Amino acid sequence: MKVNLSLIACLVLASSQASATELTTPKGVSFTQLIEADSKMPAAQIYIAESHLANQNFNAASEHYISAIELGVDSAVWNLMSFVDSGVLEGEPLQTVLMKIKSMAASNKELTLFLANFYHNRQGYEGEAFHWVNNALRLGVSGVSEIMANYIIDQKGEAHRHYTSTEAATLLKDASDNGSASASFDLAEMFDSGKKLPRNLGQARHYYNIAAKAGIIEANFKLGYFMEHGIGGDKDLIGAATMYEQLLNTDAAAEVHYRLSRIYMYNPDVFDNAKVDGVAHLIKSAELGNTDALYKVGVATYYGSDGFKVNIDKAIEHLKSSAYGGNKLAAKRLIQIYKNGDRTIAPNKELMREFQRILTEAPKY
């Protein structure tokens, strides 16, 4: 058979050109491939982390942020902190991230404060919280003095093994001097009770005054009492009344009205219309359920004293309300009344035993 050499030559040439084309044409490359090829570059780790973050894969993202930190990008720690703060990590990934933050926090105020807050707000981590609060204190972070003082006083995180009550008081004073009302009140109570510090009622009054001016309701009560009885300083009945009056529109109104009634009724030479105002406050306190006021109104109504008209039924009603509220004096008075009877009240052994039971169970005043 005669072969057409020209045709074969053309076919061979075409095949050769095709192979050459396949060998010389470059293949395409993606940005992701370039990133993977240069994955040891910190920018590449940030890119990979952000890619995982876009897919809400926080565990993988945190791994690459950690790699970026290890490659020199310290600022990536803030990305890790945002994960911890938002609660998107759990278990081992969370612990790994915390370990990385801790490794950078020893001399860093911001990281130390972050860890102190994180552990302070978690149950069961008092030791860790104390460590980082203590580190914040060492680094001069403002605002942690009061927290540390409370750790010492409450014996949290073994703080009391490292600091004394006197040092706790010093920390509270620092916080008070920097405007913390709660620190002022806590310091006042330490001086008042004498349990953690030598008792100093003058200092207690001083810090109750600071706390009261800052709006601590209980401080108003304490300062008012100190002024009323001349504790830690001069007796100041007008100042005491002023302290109490500032609390008339609070939830403590029942107790406030009772204290004002006592000041006015027992000091008619100090206040104008003292008797009238005192009785008005006493009635209001009883209406609000104060057991001491209920007892006093009950007795006054029973005997017709302090300007009250005799009303035996009302008197018994007030005395019973006071006794059921735990007032021992009211329970005793009712026991006396029901034991042998009195006025229009007939003896009643059952009621007598009931108030004897209440008397036994009532708290000691």
Image (spheres, rainbow, N blue to C red):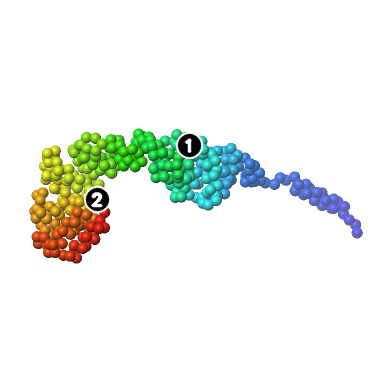
Residue 354 in sight from this viewpoint = yes
The extreme right residue here reads 1
Q: How far from the left and from the top, in percent, is residue 111?
A: 49, 39
Q: How far from the left and from the top, in percent, is residue 27?
A: 70, 47
Q: In what element is the residue under mark 1?
A: helix
Would residue 354 be found to the left or right of residue 203 on screen? left
Residue, x 17% and y 45% (percent of image)? Answer: 262
Q: In what element is the residue under mark 2?
A: loop
Between the C-alphas of marks 1 and 2, the distance is 49 Å
Q: Point out the frontmost of discs 1 and 2.
A: 2
Mark 1 crowd level (few <14, some 14–19, many ≥20, 10 Å Cα): some
Establish if 314 lies above or below 125. Answer: below
Foreground of the two, 288 or 74: 288
The quadrant the N terminus occupies is: bottom right
Residue, x 17% and y 43% (percent of image)? Answer: 263
Dot 2 amino acid type: Tyr
Q: Which residue is mark 1?
A: 109
Residue, x 46% and y 35% (percent of image)? Answer: 138
Return the disc, 1 or 2, that comes first in the chain's sequence: 1
Foreground of the two, 126 or 8: 126
Would residue 219 be found to the left or right of residue 122 on screen? left
Quarter of the view holding residue 137? top left
Would residue 234 be found to the left or right of residue 68 on screen? left
Residue, x 17% and y 59% (percent of image)? Answer: 335
Tag shown at residue 365: 2
Dot 1 amino acid type: Lys
Numbered-mark total: 2
Q: How far from the left and from the top, in percent, is residue 234?
A: 22, 35
